[in-house]
Image (cartoon, helix red, strand yellow):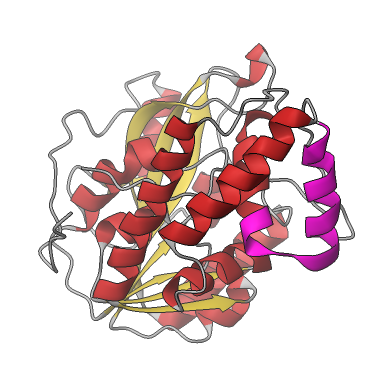
Amino acid sequence: MIFIPPIKSQGIKTKLVEWIAESTAEIEYERWVEPFMGTGVVAFNIRAKKALLCDSNPHLIKFYQGIKEQKITSAKVREYLTKEGEKLLESEGKYYYEVRDRFNKNGDSLDFLFLSRACFNGMMRFNKKGGFNVPFCKKNHRFAPALITKIVNQVQNISQIIESGDYTFINQDFQDTLKEINSNDLVYLDPPYIDRHTDYFDSWLEEQEILLNRGLKDSKAQFLLSTWLSNKYRTNEYIFSIWQDCQIITKEHFYYVGGKEINRNAVYEAIISNLKISNSISISEMKERIINKESQLTSNNIKKVTPEQFSLNF
């Protein structure tokens, strides 16, 4: 069973969690570390005993820290969404922009949850001043009782997962997180995909990708990094320059990114690692495959992996 977090965002790894879990199943480590936590879907499904989860987006960290400290509970979420959902319906959607303005002024975590579930196409986008600027999804009855119950259950599930482990949430830049990791950590990285559309809090360029690579090498930690290898339009050439000494596994995946049909295409998802993991090949071998127009797939069958650390009783 995949536990889906309450915060919604494009590019979320829900459909890739089992693949990622399989790739980490045989790796021994003391602490799970994520410099780019995002919605937390990978960490919450890996369910390590100890985890350091960081992100440059302060609203994500504040939300999950609120769950950890029980400032945000399933009961409070139900009460809030019921009340705010009624106002949204009565205003025929106009109330969304009142909540957005309020959030950009006060940064309330429940308002953040509201926006993430009522905005257009599940996008998480901020302007240069840090203001959330995604428009309304134009569904006035967005918070129907069934959806509210679904979100409440998600909050409850994630709350139990956090309570069952030793989780630390920190709002900081990835470079600061890399300074805190050690050789006993397993680092999972899901940075904004270079050279592709992103809706993250910060942009991502070649310079950041190089800094990330150097930081991981200096740390000597074990790592797995999610990225993209290719789609029908182009290939991610940065893999063969910045990550050329690593291993790679791939899987075909379909992303719904953006409102336009042109942005909804199949892509070869990749995991890059400094470890020899199941089904992995070298980056140089993958380059040869592409040159020779051979298959770019290294992973076919995904085995469901239940983390040994602990199982939850719901």
Verify whether residue 98 appears in magenta.
Answer: yes
Q: Relative to the observer, which residue lies in front, 31 or 162? A: 162
Location of residue 265 in the rendering, given as x and y in whole percent from the top left corner = 53, 18
Location of residue 41 in the rendering, given as x and y in whole percent from the top left corner = 40, 52
Verify whether residue 9 appears in magenta.
Answer: no
> Is residue 273 visible from the viewing direction of this image?
no
Q: Residue at x 38, y 32 (%)?
A: 288
Q: Residue 108: which quarter of the image?
A: bottom right
Quadrant for the C terminus in the image: bottom left
In the image, residue 267 above or below residue 59: above
Report whether 67 appears left or right of 109: left
Q: Residue at x 77, y 39 (%)?
A: 96
Q: Relative to the observer, which residue lies in front, 314 or 208? A: 314
> Is residue 157 visible from the viewing direction of this image?
yes
Quadrant for the N terminus in the image: top left
Q: Relative to the observer, which residue lies in front, 75 or 313? A: 75
Q: Give the main secondary structure of the magenta stretch.
A: helix
Per the rendered image, the range of residues in magenta is 94-111
Q: Residue 165: which quarter of the image?
A: bottom left
Q: Relative to the observer, which residue lies in front, 289 or 143? A: 143
